[in-house]
Image (spheres, grey):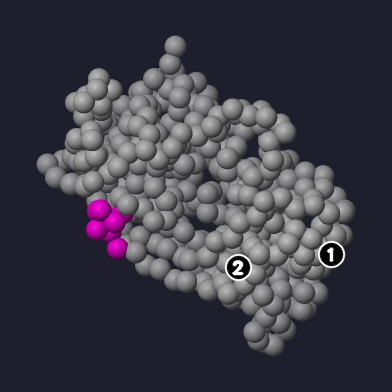
Amino acid sequence: MNTMEQHVTDTVWDVVVVGGGMVGATVALGLGQQGMKVLLLERQAVDTTWSDHKPYQVRVSALTRASENVLRNVGAWEGITSRRYHAFTAMHVWDDLSSEKIHFSAQEMGEPNLGYTVENEVIQAALWEQVKACDTIHLVLNPTIKSLRLEEGKARLELEGMGEIQTELLVGADGALSQIRQLAYIGLDTHDYEQCAVVGCVKTELPTEDTCWQRYTQDGPFAYLSMGEHLSSIAWYLPAEKMQWALNLSDQNFAREVSKASDYRLGTVVEVGERAAFPLIRRHAEHYVKSNLALVGDAAHTIHPQAGQGVNLGLLDAAALIETVLAAKLAGKRWGRYSVLRKYERWRRGDNAIVQRSMEAFDWLFKQDSNLKTTFRKGFLPLANRLIPIKNWLMAQTLNGREALPKLATSNIPNVKRNRKH
């Protein structure tokens, strides 16, 4: 065993985070920057180098104001704005059967924008810059986890070739197929939507007007997420059996089908980039916590992505867990105790479940499988579009959150102590 491995196994870590994606890196930063000894385990390093000529990436997130605040408060926002991001100022939703629409405007709400579209790779790079600069966070890359034991007030992970590591709190941030969740024997409620999402970036003939455009069709929703004057990230929801069809289309045919799916709202698609597709499955862990263990982000829940809430919910999980742990530490309590972690679970599990079900209800309402639903939409959408206070309240819930927000998500917190490497 080398010196670095000896350090990892000899230390009793305050927190061990498994998974260095957007949510896991945020948890590690929020705790490490406040002086806690954090071990971050991740399969591979994130490339933090950047070039403005880098091709646009397939996976993009629409960040809310709450998420912006979280990322600002862990020091990552500047790394995002120095790379590539785009503010959108309006959302336009319409139904192709009823021809009715609803329009959300930042100007109506007195806001500078309704959020930001940012490539996931950009968010991760900005977070990892801060991770590497924090002197209380230790990284281990490409670990193989052999076993997990929760006993004697500690979580104990056995890593192949390194031995056992101990921690007061183990955080599972390792995605929808979380190994930590499985090793902890936490059950999962699942529902297959029998849909897939096709994603990628395209250039269009007409400008995006800094607007996110969403059309409901017979196959499912189609959305353009504005990323620039003529650039959009697409989110095209199709029946699961059409996934390979969409991936196998030539670029020319893909451009034609995307133009049709959008009803030519931005004219024709003139250029397409790399594309990807994935099946849509709702997952919700039966429990978020056990003694000395907590799940965050996709390890705890996945939802229908049509409103882009997945990463935003995960960042709120991260902020809530950070606040819960730091409050316990300040009070002289063991932050891995079940009674402490239950506060985090009660804070987040209900809100996540409400958003999951809301997205399903919205998807159900706009499915073109009933004349009654179509008639209702014909009356509901124009009415909702005219009731500006109600419309703005709905958008505010999306932009700023529904429940009592964690402190990291509410504003820019001045004088945040950050442990940095010299």
> What residue is disc 2 on?
244
- Which residue sits at x=53%, y=74%? 194
Q: Is residue 289 visible?
A: yes
**Could you tell me residue 213's position as x and y percent?**
75, 59
Image quadrant in which you'd find residue 267: bottom right
Looking at the picture, which amino acid does disc 1 mark? Tyr
Name the spot of residue 186 as percent of width and height, x first. Answer: 28, 59
The answer to whether residue 391 is seen in the rendering is no
Q: Is residue 205 above or below residue 134?
A: below
Q: Can you give x and y, in whole percent of width and height, for residue 148 in the image? A: 21, 47
Q: Secondary structure at mark 2?
A: helix
Which amino acid type corresponds to the residue marked 2 in the rendered image?
A: Gln
Q: What residue is at 71 percent from the left and 74 percent from the top?
A: 217
**Quadrant holding the C terminus:** top left
Percent across and percent down for residue 347 are 39, 51
At a point 55% along the width and 29% down the height, the residue shown is: 48
Q: Residues within 10 Å of mark 2 (few under 14, many from 20)?
A: few
- 397 vs 333, left or right, is right
Mark 1 highlights which residue? 264
Nearer the observer: mark 2 or 1; the answer is 2
Of the numbered discs 2 and 1, the one sitting upstream in the chain is 2
Q: Which residue shows up at 32% across the image and 52% down it?
A: 179
In the displayed structure, 193 sits above or below 230; it is below
Calculate the distance from the C-alpha at mark 2 to the C-alpha at mark 1. Answer: 23 Å
Q: Is residue 167 magenta?
A: no
In screen coordinates, is 366 left or right of 94? Answer: left
Q: Secondary structure at mark 1?
A: loop
Q: Nearer the viewer, residue 17 or 317?
A: 17
Q: Which residues are magenta?
A: 181-187
Above or below, 55 relative to 220: above
